[in-house]
Amino acid sequence: MSAVEQADVVVVGGRIAGSAVAITLARGGRKVVVLERRSFPSDTLSTHVLVPYAVAEAARLGALERLLATGAQRSPYVHVGAGNVQLTEHWPTAEGIGYGLCIPRPEQDHAFMETARAAGADVRERADVTEVVWRDGRAAGVRYVDADGAEHELHARLVVGADGRRSTIAAEVGSWRPYRGSRNGRGAAFRYMDDPRAGDRRWGETMSQWRWGRNIGYTFPVFPGRVICLLMPPAEEIGAMRRDPDGAWDALLASDPDGIGWRLEGATNRTKLRSTAETTSFFRASSGPGWALAGDAGHFKDPVIGSGQRDALRFGRRLGELVAPVLDEGGSDAELDAALRTWERERDRQCNASYHWGCRESAPTEPATPLLQEVIRTFEGNPAHLSHNFNRTLEPERAAGPRALALGLLNALHRHPGRRGEILREALDELPAELGIRADRWFGVFRASSSRPTERPDFDWPPPPAPSARRAAPEPGVDPEEALARAHEVVMGV
């Protein structure tokens, strides 16, 4: 083993959450080492969407110029289609940004990692962390193996796990099992294709959500002329999509001929289908003596609401901002741990309602009920944008507040007289969920072990991998420019 190194912070995981932490701290002059087990650029199974608030976060971090250099299509519009209700809005502006971006993860993560390097962070790729080093009950660093198989020990005042849902750091610090969670009711399957509506400015620059049957689907412009489609049927249908990718895909689109089926009619040059049936939402305890869990390592929301990228960037940045003063000479361990707890409480408070929103949206029930359609209809011509909900410029319970819910209920009862009993039952079922969300926020009981009506707590949680099994086989070195070019070719269907 080589000589022990010393840093202020070691960040395990170099994708967007880890890069946000590293950029913020390195800019302030702290010695930050990022250990990433993969070679970058590399792909990961993930949503790509940066809503305007996330784009604004990228601008704060200094990564926006690199993101735009990918050639990504700016999308200033957002559309929601639910049955016969079709609503299109301009995105609400967030810190001067009025458009969203959808950039594939190889290019997106590479942009943030290069921004971290430019800020002064020491980014080490193909570095596989095997364990946390402890001193007097505190996380004091990590041991890792480099690409050549050499073992290293790196000490730091703060260890940040930003290494995803199957976080090695979460397992090492004893925070593997979430304290709150909800089993996913929807799967996710996506592919890229040539955009048949690219010539129509409205659709070629619009991020869209479509609701029909028991399904939710999305279309996001990626690069000019290319679009990604994400389909989210009930989770049990993902198996059929894997057995017959094209047949099941085409049948699902055909089941909504006037919505997403029309939007993608005639699409060609489709890439291979990628899918998952496991998107369980959760909160882990995310701070402790000398350690923190950022991004998906600490908290994961179902991708149905598209908030993961925004929150990874925001709370990666906020973690760096809150601990930076304490890392200066003279800051005590007790002050560092207090700053970490403050950060975690802020994250929980701001993500609480969106977590519940995701749990509700991932229920494999009809997502375009008469009640929901009429609530959406209340936003037609309304300056209070429904898209605040996606952008998180307002909390979900304020974006679709009591007025919209009450007016939507009255209109649903009026326009759908044959379904009044069903509509009233749905409204009554929603009431405990609304109260539960507010109880979590108002009374600070989110950490309580009891679940809320939005949650499906019967999720299976796998045991953490054994330490010996965490070590990955060394990857061959790759030329970043070649890897970026190849990743772009895959997205473009070349």
Image: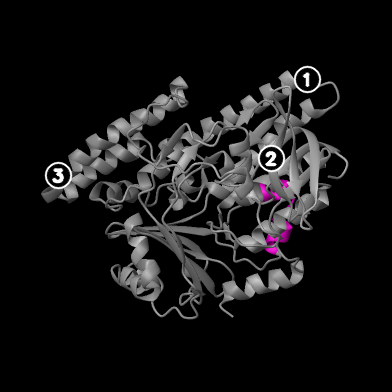
- Predominant SS of the magenta segment: helix
| Mark 2 → mark 1, Cα distance in angstroms | 24 Å
Residue 62: in magenta span: yes
Which of disc 1 and disc 2 is earlier in sequence?
Answer: 2
| Farthest left residue in view | 418
| Mark 3 → mark 1, Cα distance in angstroms | 62 Å
Of tags 2 and 3, the one toward the viewer is: 2
Q: Residue at x 34, y 66 (%)?
A: 240
**In the rendered image, which quarter is residue 126 located in?**
bottom right
Instruction: Please tell me how crowded label 1 is: few (under 14), some (14-19), or many (20+) other residues with Cα within 10 Å.
Output: few
Q: In this figure, which residue is indicated by the disc labeled 3?
A: 420
Q: Residue at x 25, y 46 (%)?
A: 371
Q: In this figure, which residue is indicated by the disc labeled 1?
A: 332
Relative to 386, is 336 on the left or the right? right
Residue 383: mark in rendering? none
Q: Amino acid at mark 3?
A: Arg
Q: Amino acid at mark 1?
A: Ser
Stretch of the chain drawn in magenta: 56-68
Q: In this figure, which residue is indicated by the disc labeled 2?
A: 131
In this picture, is 322 found above or below 275?
above
In this picture, is 59 found above or below 434?
below
